[in-house]
Amino acid sequence: MKNKLIIIFLVMSNVIAFSQKKQVQNYKYIIVPERFDFLKENDQYKTSSLTKFLLQKNGFTVILDSEEYPIELKNNPCNALTANVTNKSSMFKTKVVIELKDCYNKTVYASKEGESRLKEYKRSYQEAIRNAHANMNSITYEALSGEDIIQTKKEVIVSKPMIVNRVDKIIPSINKEIESTKNKATNTLSVLYAQPKENGYQLINLKPEVVFLILNTNIQDVYIIKNKNGLLYKKEAHWIAEFYENEKLVTKKYQIKF
């Protein structure tokens, strides 16, 4: 178990090295959902349009998630943050927070609460969003300098040998643990089909439905299972998915068609 946690930590540290180096103001793009979770319709009360308009004042290139992305962003979606307006309203006040999340769904910035006591929904939400944004005046887009980019690339390159060497020692022990826990694995070998996505693949079954979203790593035949605390890696002719579900380790074997 300890070995598995070590490999997950090492792989994740290498993959997100560049995003951790960046500060909020170093992200060129911000993506705004066309509909926030607490609303029923796209751009209801003009909340998405207003959020886009306000964040553009900070110097970012702001795009609705329904709009065409620039080539630069298509090639690397981690160049963007996603803006989310979270509703924290009470019975007598409309209260919202503007959150900025990176491509790993980690919150890298949250504004102070913006409030409104207006009774009409559209005016109330818009005033609350404006008040939340008023606390974000200090965040303006600043491109990474050439020196910062070079230093970041050096950090990633230096980390690769350490990870590869460590994996060579860890994988055999993981394989032994898998052999001892075969009774936990599924008995039927399911077939999944890989469809390329930015930074990885989505794995679908025959229904079709998405079973996993996996992210590339610098290690051959090892992937991070997105939104799960786990890994997907190849063992002989099959693929092993290990992740936690309801605080229990789940091990499953698949045949994957790339």
Image (cartoon, grey):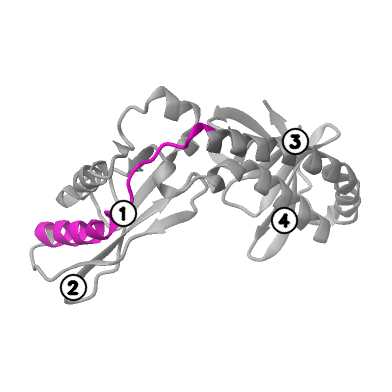
- Residue 153: where, in percent of width, then height? 62, 34
Q: Would you identify the image quadrant in which residue 3 lies? A: bottom right
Magenta range: 122-146
For image coordinates 77% across by 55% down, the residue present is 6
Q: Are marks 3 and 2 in contact (CB under 8 Å)?
A: no
Identify the residue under disc 3: 219
Residue 108 visible in the picture = yes
Task: For mark 2, give the secondary structure.
Answer: loop
> Nearer the N terminus, badge 1 or badge 4?
1
Q: Quadrant of residue 56?
A: top left
Of the residues shown, which amino acid type is indicated by label 4?
Answer: Val
Report the residue marked by disc 2. 93
* Residue 255 or residue 55, whichever sits in front: 55
Label 2 vs label 4, nearer the camera:
2
Label 2: few (<14), some or many (≥20) within 10 Å?
Answer: some
| CA gap, disc 1 and disc 4 | 45 Å
Residue pointed to by mark 4: 250
Q: Is residue 4 left or right of residue 38?
A: right
Chain-order first, disc 2 or disc 4: 2
59 to the left or right of 25: left
x and y percentages locating residue 147 in the rendered image: 55, 35
Give the labeled residue for mark 1: 138
Is there CB contact under 8 Å for labels 2 and 4?
A: no
Is disc 3 placed on a helix, strand or loop? loop
